[in-house]
Image (cartoon, coloured by chain):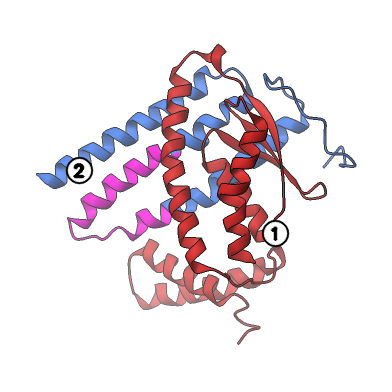
């Protein structure tokens, strides 16, 4: 069973996603969904890290809420910056040193940085244990790095242990 | 009536942020700064349109599972493509207003 479904949750999600996209429960689509749910994880498993349990579901929920809130704030901030004068922007590269080691935590952190306030992760430097971030308007690089670490990295480390 | 008001509200908000994304793409002075406009403004822009679609179809007998999937796919793909574009910009040493950081030590120059 584990050999056929190395990632049971991923398989279930693929199965449900296909049926939701097709918006039907016809037998043909059920069969296709089952084939995709078995096939895709088997093909893609070499790209994945081993499955990892979520240590703290409460922290995961909290982080999701924080990120959704920040996405909305990020949009308002970027809208103001984009519509304002261009020469007032202070773009900067900021290196955020990493304490998190788990690959899931690091890649999630990079994704969260990109979706939130005025920052895009440009380069994940695993060898240096740092993420290189480009900020659209940043007067205080050290403060930005500290904010990213306390707001996103700490909860991620809690989640992945 | 209330449904139509909610749908219109989300459509207007969504369109506004999509417009902001487009304006940013046109106005921002260098590549890495332009990268911010589509990754941010468009997220809420498309989010607004999806909410409008969700409300409309939910009240017309088609619960919006698809909208949730689109949201999920967007959050999965946008950061990855932005990261690849940024990496490429860094590698090509594109003109940038922010002083470019030195390449990662020991990095393969062709990586």
* Closest to the observer, A146 or A111: A146
Magenta span includes A22: no
Determine whether label 1 and label 2 are within 8 Å by CB.
no
* Closest to the observer, A153 or A118: A153
Neighbour tally class for label 1: few under 14, some 14-19, many 20 plus, Cα within 10 Å: few
Magenta span includes B47: yes
The residues tagged by marks 1 and 2 sit, at their Cα atoms, a distance apart of 41 Å
Q: Residue at x 53, y 14 (%)?
A: A86
Up-down relation of residue B107 to residue A157 (above or below): above
Screen quadrant of the C terminus of chain B: top right
Q: Residue at x 45, y 77 (%)?
A: A31
Total label count?
2
- Snapshot quadrant of residue A154: bottom right
Q: Residue at x 64, y 58 (%)?
A: A105
Screen quadrant of the N terminus of chain B: top left
Rendered image: mark on residue B6: 2
**Residue receiving disc 1:** A103
Up-down relation of residue A115 to residue B100 (above or below): below
* Closest to the observer, A12 or A35: A12
Q: Chain of mark 2?
A: B
> What is chain A's hue in the picture?
red
> What is chain B's hue in the picture?
blue
Instruction: Provide the residue span drawn in magenta.
Output: B43-70
Q: Chain of mark 1?
A: A
- Any part of residue B22 in sight: yes
């Amino acid at each position: 069973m584990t050999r056929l479904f190395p990632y049971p949750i991923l398989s279930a999600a693929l199965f449900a996603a296909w049926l939701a996209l097709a918006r039907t429960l016809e037998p043909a689509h059920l069969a296709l969904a089952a084939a995709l749910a078995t096939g895709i994880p088997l093909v893609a498993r070499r790209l994945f890290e081993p499955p990892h349990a979520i240590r703290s579901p409460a922290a995961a929920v909290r982080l999701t809420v924080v990120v959704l809130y920040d996405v909305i704030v990020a949009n308002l901030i970027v809208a103001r910056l984009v519509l304002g004068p261009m020469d007032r922007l202070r773009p900067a590269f900021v290196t955020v040193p990493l304490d998190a080691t788990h690959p899931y935590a690091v890649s999630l952190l990079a994704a969260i940085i990109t979706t939130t306030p005025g920052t895009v992760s440009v380069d994940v430097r695993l060898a240096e244990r740092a993420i290189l971030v480009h900020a659209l308007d940043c007067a205080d690089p050290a403060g930005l790095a500290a904010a990213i670490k306390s707001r996103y990295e700490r909860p991620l480390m809690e989640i992945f242990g | 009536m209330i449904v139509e008001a909610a749908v219109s509200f989300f459509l207007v908000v969504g369109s506004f942020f999509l417009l902001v994304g487009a304006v940013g793409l046109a106005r921002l002075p260098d590549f890495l700064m332009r990268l911010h406009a589509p990754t941010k403004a468009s997220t809420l822009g498309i989010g607004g349109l999806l909410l409008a679609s969700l409300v409309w179809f939910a009240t017309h007998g088609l619960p919006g599972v698809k909208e949730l999937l689109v949201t999920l796919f967007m959050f999965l793909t946008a950061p990855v493509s932005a990261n690849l574009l940024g990496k490429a910009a860094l590698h090509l040493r594109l003109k940038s207003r922010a002083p470019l950081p030195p390449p990662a030590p020991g990095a393969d120059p062709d990586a």
